[in-house]
Amino acid sequence: MQRIFGQQPIENAIIEVNNLLATQPIAMITKEQIAEIGNRYGIILAEEFRLNMEEFYAVMLNNLIQDFKFELGNRKKLEYLQQILALDDSQVSFLTWEIGATVYEKCYVKAIADGRFSEEERTQLDRLEEQLQLPKKIITEISSKIRTNFVTQYFTKLIHTKRISPRDEEQWKMLCQNLNITPNSDARTTQLFNHGKLYWALENTPLPLLNPLISLQKSESCHLHIENVAWYEERAMRSKYGGTYSKLISSGPIYLTQKKLLHYGSEKAHTIKLDDIIRIQETNDGITIYKLTGKNPTLKMPHHEKEMLRIILTRLSSLNY
């Protein structure tokens, strides 16, 4: 029917407004021009296409406040755009808070990308807070969330390296101090952090000296003691198909000195001279020790103890594998 009577769909009105905003400087567009478009279609644009008019404002707002560009001139441009689009203050405040919070969050992330605030970055954020006029509650929530996330991600990456040097720990503490965040981690995460510090120390500092309850040679030093280590050996299967299986020989503590590894099993004691070791190989739950002669045992233990044994045994034997 619209085509028969030469009428155009009212949706064309919003297209005309969009074209006007896209082709003319905002300062050159008048409120009367916008109203005239609505009159030709017999509508009040701010009522019929309220969301579209808000979107025009939102796009301009988003473009102007990216990367700290929300200067006084741009603010006046937005005030003028509000007038010609016939938006009330409540609409503009809502859009400013919604878009402003998103942009402020991006700017905040950018400002602390290196883990600290420079004076310039702090000044830019302060100015943006003032210009956006965001509620203090929103500013505080954004700041706390971003700083906490940054510290958490940094801590997670640090733990995943599995090696934490004194310098790494000091940088971590400085980061928390710079961002005014009190570290908060669960027991498991704290344990992994401490393990990372220990592994680094075992690889880079003098090995620990223990006083074991066993007799050692006068010149012999004990560097590691682990309880409940299971000693396995490969055995041939008694079947026509052949093959091998892993047999538990005994369980008990191990002691590692600069000369040998001792295992005091419940059934039998074992000694491996470090000079006889060809290589060591990690398994899912232990370490297999390959020797010049004899059987090659697999020592099974929890992951943390396995890693300590691997590190110290490698250092003492000067093994590369």
Image (cartoon, rainbow, N blue to C red):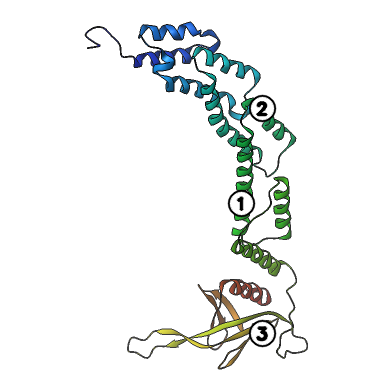
Location of residue 297 in the rendering, given as x and y in whole percent from the top left corner: 53, 84
Left or right: where does residue 207 sit relative to residue 96?
right
How many residues crowd around disc 2 within 10 Å: few (fewer than 14), some, or many (20 or more)? Answer: few
Identify which amino acid the numbered label 3 is placed on.
Lys
Say if mark 2 contacts mark 1, CB within 8 Å. Answer: no
Indicate the amino acid at tag 2. Glu
Real-space CA distance between mark 2 and mark 3, rounded to the nearest whole angstrom: 70 Å
Residue at the spot x=37%, y=6% of the render? 40
Q: Secondary structure at mark 1?
A: helix
Question: Label 1 amino acid?
Answer: Thr
How far is mark 2 from mark 1, CA to CA? 29 Å
Between 232 and 17, the one nearer to me in the picture? 17
**Looking at the figure, which quarter contains the N terminus?**
top left
Which residue appears farthest toward the right when viewing the image? 218
State the CA–CA distance, disc 3 to disc 1.
42 Å
Q: Nearer the viewer, residue 317 or 142?
A: 142
Q: Disc 2 marks which residue?
A: 130
Residue 149 relative to residue 117: left or right: left
- Name the N-terminal-most of marks 2 and 3: 2
The residue mark sitting in front, 3 or 1, is 1
Q: Residue 41, located in which quarter of the rendered image?
A: top left
Describe the element under mark 2 as helix, strand or loop: helix
* Rendered image: mark on residue 260: 3
- At which x and y percent is residue 150? 62, 47
The local secondary structure at tag 3 comes to: strand
For marks 3 and 1, the one nearer the N-term is: 1
Mark whose residue sits in front, 2 or 1: 2
- Residue 49 vs 162, above or below: the answer is above
Residue 101, picture quadrant: top right
Q: Are marks 3 and 1 in contact (CB under 8 Å)?
A: no
Residue at image mark 1: 152
